Image: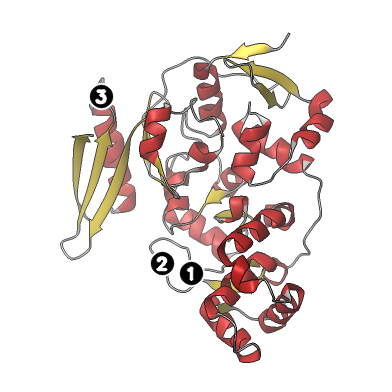
Amino acid sequence: MARVLDRRALNRAALDRQLLLHRSRMPALDAVERLVAIQAQETNMPYLGLWTRLDGFRRDDLTGLLHDRSVVRGSILRGTQHMSTAGDYLWLRPLVQACLLRAQQAAFGRVTKDWDLDELAKEARRLLDGRTLTRPQLARKLAEQWPDRDVQALGWTVQALVPVVHPPPSGTWNTGGATPFALAEDWIGEPLQQPAPERLIRRYLSAFGPASVKDFQMWSGMRRMDADFGELRPALQVYKDENGVELFDLPDIPFPDDRPAPVRFLPAFDNLILAYADRTRMMTDEHRKAVCVGAITKPTLLVDGRVHGTWALKHDKKSDRATLTIELFSPLPDDQPVQEEAAALLTFAAPTAEHAVHLKDL
C-alpha cells in the first residue's frame, strides 16, 4: 500500500530539493543544472532565484556563465523564457517543441494560418546563420520577402519554430532591450538531441518530487504524459497525497527532517511556485489567487516554508533609494527573521543604495 504524504512532508521535500532549507555552497552552474531551468521572463529573476538558494552568490557568477556560454537563455518550459545549462538546452528544447507551437498558434494562429511555416523557419535559419539579429531586425528582414505579413507575428513565430537562444548582455542584471536571436546550435557549438521524455521526468522528480503526472505537465507544458509515467512506474517510488492522488518520485531519496524552514524571498515566476498543479504544499488556494493573477506570478515571501505574502522591490536610481515592500497575508509570528532576510536581499540587489523595508497587511 502506497505511503500517504501530508502537505508538510511534501513542503519539506520540495524545499530541500530546491536548496531552500539552507543555502548551498554549490557553484552556480551546478545549481542551474539541479533546478533544470530557471525562470528568466524578467532580467533580474534568475539572479534573485540563485541568490536565495546559494551561499555567497554574486551577480557576476551568473553573468559570467552566460558570457562563456555555459548557461543560455531561451524559450523552454511552458514556452516561456528560462535559463538552463547549454548542455541541457540541447535536449530540453526538442522535448517542449510541441508546447511552443501551441503557444504560437494561440497567439498568432489566425494570422499565420495560410503561411508555410517550414519555409519561414528555413529562411529564418538562413538569415541567422553565423550571426545574431534582434527579433525586430529579423522580422524586418523576413518582411522584405513577405511584405504582406504581420511583422510582429513573423518575429514571434520564428521563436517558436526555430531553436534560438538570446545571447548576453541581453537578459543580464538590469539589462533589457530588443531580444537578440542566435541559432542555438551555432551559439552552443553542438547539435540538438532527441531524448525520450524519461530524461526530463527524472530530472523534474529529482528537483521537485514527489509529484503527480499533472504536476509534471503543469511545470513542463507537455501533455498526455500518463503513458510515459506508466512505463517508468517500475523504476519509481509511488506515494499518495492526502486526497489519494498518486505521486511519483525517484527511489531512495531521503526525506528531510521536519525542521523549521528559514525565511526566503522567491522572485516572480519562480518555478517552485509554478511546478505543481496542486500548489497546496506551498500555499492555500486563497493565497494562490493573490499570488497567481492571470499570467502573472508575483514574488513571494516564504515563512516556515509556506507562502506568507508577496513583495516588490523598487530602486529609485535618482535618489539611490531601494525600498522593499512586503504585503503579508497574515501577521508574522516574529518579524525579525523577515527583516534580516529583507536587509540581505536589499544589500544584494542595491548594495550602494539607502535601504527601506515596509511591512503591510493585505
Amino acid type of the residue that numbered disc 1 sits on in the rendered structure? Pro
Which of pointers 2 and 3 lies earlier in the amino acid sequence?
Answer: 2
The answer to which quarter of the image holds residue 247 is: top right
Q: What residue type is labelled 2?
A: Thr
Few, some or many C-alpha atoms within 10 Å of disc 2 (few <14, some 14-19, many ≥20)? few
Q: Is the residue 86 above or below the residue 7 in the image?
A: below
Q: Residue at x 73, y 21 (%)?
A: 237
Point 41% across, 55% down: residue: 44
The C terminus lies in quadrant: top left
In contact (CB < 8 Å): disc 2 and disc 1:
yes
Q: Residue 169 carries which label?
A: 1
Q: Earlier in the sequence, mark 1 or mark 3?
A: 1
Mark pair 1, 3: CA separation? 40 Å
Residue type (three-letter) at the residue carrying disc 3: Leu
Residue depicted at 46% across the width and 46% down the height: 269
Q: Name the residue under label 2.
A: 175
Q: Mark 3 points at which residue?
A: 332
- Decide which of 251, 280 is in the foreground and name it: 280
Picture coordinates of residue 166 (x, y %)? 57, 67
Q: Are the two marked residues, 2 and 3, in contact with CB atoms closer than 8 angstroms?
A: no
Mark 2 element type: loop
Q: Nearer the viewer, residue 62 or 89?
A: 89
